[in-house]
């Protein structure tokens, strides 16, 4: 049994010399990939390394919309019972299109209903609670988590069917496969020589938790404003998470400015339908862009999560793409291991790439089009998109299709996302 994932690992601690899989990045994708593989192939030695200091993950005040399929995966991995008390079902989604100064925001589109009886299409989960549950499972499954240990370099040694991975403290670990889950600005992706398609939207997403007087009743809202979408996402205990898109320059001014100005601007967008509001966590701004890796794999190397694709949050699907990556990669690795194949061989990894690349390119293109269509105040486009939203709202079967897409249960879904064992 590995030491507790939250215990301090001294810099001079003796680290493993060999592993079957080394995962760089202890965010939800890295940990989810580790737990998914360890659960179904316990004989594989898995090590997770992360450049961040110990326990820094506990400072993450963000929350994420987790689709129904991802909840099924967390249930299958025995994580859900720890997360459930902190999870808020999204019972209804309301979409409006207006200007900030408009006195009334007409509702153009409403989504409501469950995927199955008692199963909402999505839930809001605090990131810290998801990470906590995944780290607990890593501890139970014998996955080592090494903090304050970034990867500085690696090279393949095909004679030994391994990659030699060098850490910042001078330690070297030999592994059959290196999985990069180190975020949208992945250094490992660059080290592997993988190029990206990238452009900056000139926007930033302001994220904060807002407390309010009245119950939101599980209702999420997305207001399409000229500067970009303003999303209100329900949390437990009369709180909501906001994702507020603005130009990068204005977002930085709002973050750096005084609280009074921020509160006035927030109230203008949030409204007072839920009573008095109060900013509960320090607002933070994150730059928004589109990043798509041209390749997801190289020999003994694979990308997953934001390291493979960074998309606009307009559809709330970034996290769920990462869940699909983790589930698909784990399934291919476990199947190869059971057949006695080399889990780091390029032909094994290319099966994962074929499975995931089209989906991520399609979602990246969709969010890009939506952002360009809605983040403006051009009159003809406003009329066109308002008409389109109204048409969708009057077609129940089309709305059901969108709900199934948002829930993550449509298409060629990995077993874990169907709630099945690998």
Image: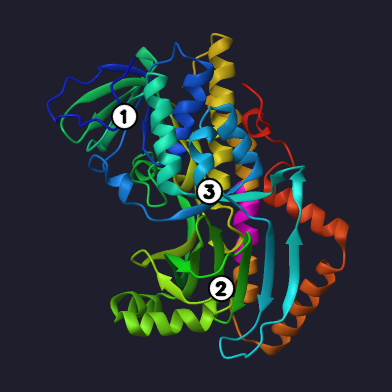
Q: Which residues are magenta?
A: 360-368
As drawn, the residue found furthest toward the left would be 12
- Closest to the observer, 79 or 200: 79
**Considering the numbered disc 3 on the image, is that residue within a helix, a strand or a loop?**
helix
| Place of residue 285 in the rendered image (x, y in percent of width and height, measured from the top left) | 38, 67
**Considering the numbered disc 2 on the image, is that residue within a helix, a strand or a loop?**
loop
- Closest to the observer, 70 or 373: 70
Q: Quadrant of the C terminus?
A: top right
Does the image show residue 284?
yes
- Quarter of image, res 178: top left
Disc marking residue 237:
none
Q: Quick check: 149 left or right of 194?
A: left
As drawn, the residue found furthest toward the top would be 340
Q: Which residue is mark 3?
A: 319
At x 42%, y 85%, the residue is 264
Discs 1, 2 touching: Cβ within 8 Å: no
Q: Is residue 171 above or below residue 308?
A: above
Q: Which residue is mark 1?
A: 5
At x 59%, y 25%, the residue is 331
Can residue 362 be found in the magenta stretch? yes
For marks 2 and 3, the one nearer the N-term is 2
């Amino acid at each position: 049994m590995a030491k507790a994932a939250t215990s301090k690992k001294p810099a001079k601690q003796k680290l493993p010399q060999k592993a079957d899989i080394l995962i760089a990045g202890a965010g939800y994708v890295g940990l989810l990939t580790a737990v998914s593989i360890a659960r179904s192939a316990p004989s594989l030695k898995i090590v997770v390394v992360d450049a961040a200091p110990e326990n820094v993950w506990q400072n993450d005040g963000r929350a994420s919309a987790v689709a129904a399929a991802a909840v099924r995966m967390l249930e299958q991995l025995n994580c859900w019972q720890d997360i459930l008390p902190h999870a808020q079902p999204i019972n209804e989604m309301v979409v409006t299109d207006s200007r900030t100064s408009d006195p009334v925001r007409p509702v153009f589109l409403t989504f409501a209903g469950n995927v199955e009886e008692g199963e909402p299409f999505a839930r809001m989960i605090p990131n810290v609670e998801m990470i906590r549950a995944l780290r607990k499972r890593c501890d139970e499954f014998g996955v080592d988590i090494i903090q304050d240990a970034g990867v500085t370099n690696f090279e393949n040694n095909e004679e030994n069917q391994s990659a030699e991975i060098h850490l910042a403290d001078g330690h070297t670990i030999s592994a059959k496969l290196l999985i990069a889950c180190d975020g949208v600005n992945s250094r490992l992706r660059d080290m592997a020589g993988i190029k990206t398609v990238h452009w900056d939207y000139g926007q930033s997403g302001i994220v904060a938790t807002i407390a309010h007087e009245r119950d939101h009743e599980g209702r999420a809202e997305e207001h399409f404003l000229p500067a970009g979408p303003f999303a209100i996402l329900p949390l437990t205990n009369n709180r909501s998470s906001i994702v507020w898109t603005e130009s990068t320059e204005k977002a930085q001014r709002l973050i750096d400015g005084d609280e009074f100005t921020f509160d006035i601007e927030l109230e203008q967008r949030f409204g007072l339908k839920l009573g008095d509001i109060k900013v509960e966590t320090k607002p933070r701004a994150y730059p928004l862009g589109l990043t798509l890796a041209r390749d997801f794999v190289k020999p003994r190397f694979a990308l997953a999560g934001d390291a493979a694709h960074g998309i606009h949050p307009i559809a709330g699907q970034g996290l769920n793409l990462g869940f699909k990556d983790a589930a698909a990669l784990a399934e291919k690795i476990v199947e190869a291991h059971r057949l006695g194949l080399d889990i780091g061989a390029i032909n094994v990894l290319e099966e994962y790439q074929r499975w995931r690349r089209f989906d991520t390119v399609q979602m990246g293109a969709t969010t890009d089009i939506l952002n360009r269509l809605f983040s403006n105040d051009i009159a003809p486009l406003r009329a066109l998109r308002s008409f389109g939203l109204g048409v969708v709202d009057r077609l129940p079967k089309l709305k059901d299709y969108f709900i199934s897409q948002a829930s993550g249960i449509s298409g060629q879904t990995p077993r874990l996302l169907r709630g099945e064992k690998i």
